[in-house]
Image (tube, rainbow, N blue to C red):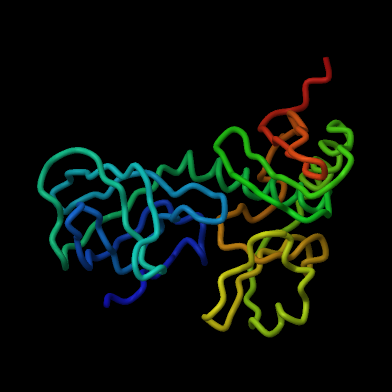
Amino acid sequence: MADPTEQLFAADAYLSTVEANVVAVDGDGAILLDRTNFYATSGGQPGDTGFLERADGTQIAVTGTVYGDPSKSVIRHLTGGGVLPEPGEKLILHIDWERRHKLMRMHTACHLLSVVCPFPITGASVGEEESRVDFDMADAPDKAEITSQIMRLVSENHPIFTRTIQESELEANPGLVKSKNVRPPRGTGSIRLVCIGDDANVDSQPCGGTHVTETGEVGPVHIGKIEKKGRENRRFRIRFGALDSS
């Protein structure tokens, strides 16, 4: 069994380009690498796209990134013909940085929404232009007020960082988990927290996704719609750009 892929994006989400070695290529043409800056689909955030550059300059397009087996190994969905790289070959990995940065900003905005709306999260999906977060809440608040509170956090430009705690610490602080139906993966002994604010005074929650390093980098966002999805479930659609007050 191959060693798990080193997930460089977990420590530095701004690595747009990095070198890696091919570990294996499976029968479907998916490539397993020893290290990667490509985020794999999980936690409501889609996997990265981009391309793999070979030594002769040819490119292999990557249309998606997913987890393989074992779960910490990362494989790619590839497009185009040509000869696939061989195990041991060195590649330069290029993520679609413009797309990734949008997803980082959006994912961070979703965290800010969960601060403004401190209710159990029943579902979430991060997108390039619009994301959704579902909350277990009976009454829908005013979308303009929620937008205002999110933008206040953006304008305050709080730092965003990660830290690691032991699983036992999470057990002792169950309130860190905001998702009602999904729990952070266990078994490694440690949990990655995404923290917002000095000393995490704004927010702290388990998350394996990619985020910006300051709330100001999110830029203008707004709540475009709040939908009723069940008796006590509200779906918030968060979008880039200022709220249209007309």
Q: Residue at x 25, y 58 (%)?
A: 31
In the rendering, at what x and y percent does residue 139 appear?
89, 40
Horizontal side of residue 51 vs 7, given as left or right: left
Q: Decide: is 117 above or below 173.
A: above
Left or right: residue 17 versus residue 130 is left
Q: Decide which of 69, 45 is in the foreground and name it.
A: 69
Q: Find residue 143 and report its image quarter.
A: top right
**Above or below: residue 124 compared with residue 146:** below
The percent position of residue 123, horizontal first and vertical second, equals: 66, 49
The answer to whether 236 is drawn above or below residue 25 in the figure is: above
Where residue 67 appears, x then y in whole percent? 39, 60
Q: Nearer the viewer, residue 236 or 194?
A: 236
Q: Residue furthest top?
A: 246
Return the residue nearer the eye: 2 or 159.
Answer: 2
In the picture as drawn, the residue positioned furthest to the left comes out as 83
Label tally: 0
Kindly identify the residue that appears in the image at 41 percent across and 42 percent down.
Answer: 96
Q: Measuring from the top left, give residue 107's x and y in whole percent.
A: 62, 48
Q: Is residue 65 above or below residue 229?
A: below
Q: In the figure, is residue 166 to the left or right of 210?
A: right
Q: Residue at coordinates 82% horizontally, 54% vertically from top-left?
A: 119
Q: Where's the N terminus, which quadrant?
A: bottom left
At 80% from the left and 53% from the top, the residue drawn is 115
Where the C terminus falls, by quadrant? top right
- Would you identify the image quadrant in which residue 40 lies? bottom left
